[in-house]
């Protein structure tokens, strides 16, 4: 009889724990993104390229949204009310401490956008295992695409987070991206840390 009761209790505990799987975080660093929270930048590039450009390119620009979810929500609502906006650029710092949950919270708002959006990596995004979380959610730290004869180049300039190792920003990659090509007429370079900032690797 006691064995049956123990088995019944164990079964109930198991069912309860598996049913409440979403309620528990086993580690704040655990990365378990849903499909909509993976490879976001590439999926938005593909979405943008399906959009036929007109005579005016309109870009909505934001960044440093960590901890400012109310403002992010307002930003998304305003963009969605403006049919002229072609796409959104988020210049980095979606997460505050590079935690996967913070990425998920931030992207929850951006997923509501009616237009494509692209997220660059910021210094706060790289804290802890943030580099892994960022690459799983958004993709490569450096990326580019061409739209309507314009090349948009997103480059990681967070030198301090890489201990000024001489590899961030990747100047050789940038040089290759900027070489003249018949596919584009002009280039726009987007970065989080500006060259005159102390976090930028001046070497």
Image: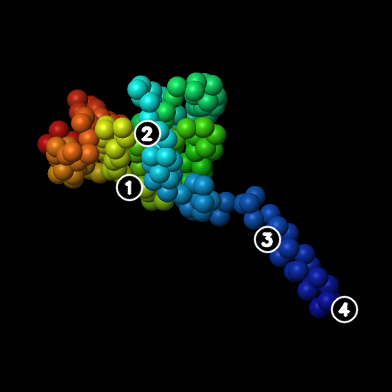
User: Residue 183 lies in what quarter of the image?
Assistant: top left
Mark-to-mark CA distance, 3 and 1:
34 Å
Q: Is label 4 in a helix, a strand or a loop?
A: loop
Tag 1 and tag 4, C-beta contact below 8 Å: no
Sequence-first disc among 4 and 2: 4
Identify which residue is drawn at 38% across, 39% down: 49
* Percent x, y of residue 120: 35, 37
Nearest to the eye among marks 2 and 1: give it.
Answer: 1
Sequence-first disc among 3 and 1: 3
Mark-to-mark CA distance, 2 and 3:
36 Å
Identify which residue is drawn at 53% across, 25% down: 80
Mark-to-mark CA distance, 1 and 4:
59 Å
Sequence-first disc among 3 and 4: 4
Mark-to-mark CA distance, 2 and 1:
13 Å
Instruction: Identify the residue position indicated by label 4 in the image.
Output: 1
- Residue closer to the observer: 46 or 7: 46
Instruction: Identify the residue position indicated by label 3 in the image.
Output: 18
Instruction: Identify the residue position indicated by label 1 in the image.
Output: 140
Q: Residue 92 got which mark?
A: 2
* Percent x, y of residue 59: 38, 25
Q: Is label 1 in a helix, a strand or a loop?
A: loop
Left or right: residue 42 versus residue 11 is: left
């Amino acid at each position: 009889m006691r064995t049956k009761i123990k088995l019944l209790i164990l079964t109930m505990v198991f069912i309860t724990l598996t049913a409440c799987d979403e309620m528990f975080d086993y580690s704040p660093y655990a990365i378990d993104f849903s499909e909509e929270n993976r490879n976001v930048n590439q999926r938005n590039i593909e979405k943008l390229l399906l959009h036929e450009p007109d005579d005016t390119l309109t870009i909505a620009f934001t960044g440093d949204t960590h901890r400012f979810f109310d403002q992010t929500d307002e930003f998304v609502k305003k963009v969605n009310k403006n049919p002229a906006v072609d796409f959104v650029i988020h210049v980095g710092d979606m997460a505050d401490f590079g935690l996967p949950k913070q990425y998920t919270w931030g992207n929850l708002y951006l997923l509501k956008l009616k237009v494509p959006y692209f997220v660059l990596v910021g210094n706060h995004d790289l804290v802890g295992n943030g580099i892994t979380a960022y690459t799983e959610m958004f993709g490569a730290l450096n990326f580019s695409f061409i739209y309507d004869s314009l090349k948009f180049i997103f480059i990681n300039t967070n030198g301090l987070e890489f201990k000024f190792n001489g590899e961030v920003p990747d100047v050789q990659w940038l040089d290759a991206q900027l070489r003249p090509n018949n596919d584009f007429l002009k280039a726009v370079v987007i970065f989080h840390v500006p060259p005159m900032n102390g976090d930028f690797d001046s070497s």
